[in-house]
Image (cartoon, helix red, strand yellow):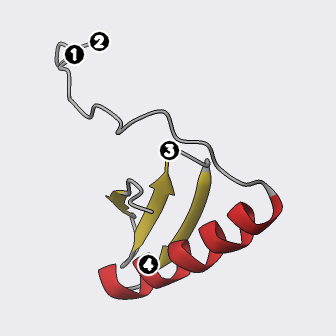
Amino acid sequence: MLLTVVLLPTTEDGFTALNPETGTTSQGETVEETLANLREATELYVEEFPLTIAGHPLITTFELPAHA
């Protein structure tokens, strides 16, 4: 099953990860650790709440004015 990950750097040294299909999140000090932690959390979630995926997500960006 191919799932999406959004990685965000934290204000400390590390990352927070989000899987939008399940809403699971995790964190770690490195990208590899963060992904491993998210994978584990998502596997546990899917065991309890099986997924039915309708298609791949569309990921894009948008801008806001600097003084919004």
Task: Estimate the spatial distance between the alpha carbons at disc 3 and disc 1, rounded to whole Å.
Answer: 22 Å
Which residue is at a point 72% across and 72% down the rendered structure image?
Answer: 44
* Mark 4 lies on residue: 34
- Mark 4 near mark 3, Cβ–Cβ under 8 Å? no
- Mark 1 near mark 2, Cβ–Cβ under 8 Å? yes
* Mark 3 lies on residue: 20
**Between discs 2 and 4, the one toward the N terminus:** 4
Task: Estimate the spatial distance between the alpha carbons at disc 2 and disc 3, rounded to whole Å.
Answer: 26 Å
* Mark 2 lies on residue: 68
Check the image and report above or below for 50 versus 64: below
Helix, strand or loop at label 1? It is: loop
Q: Position of residue 42 (x, y in %)?
A: 61, 67
The amino acid beneath tag 3 is Pro
Check the image and report above or below for 35 versus 42: below
| Disc 4 crowd, CA 10 A, few/some/many (<14, 14-19, 20+) | many
Helix, strand or loop at label 3? It is: loop
User: In front of the other: label 4 or label 3?
Assistant: 3
**Quadrant assignment, res 17:** bottom left
The amino acid beneath tag 2 is Ala
**Between discs 2 and 3, the one toward the N terminus:** 3
User: In front of the other: label 2 or label 4?
Assistant: 4
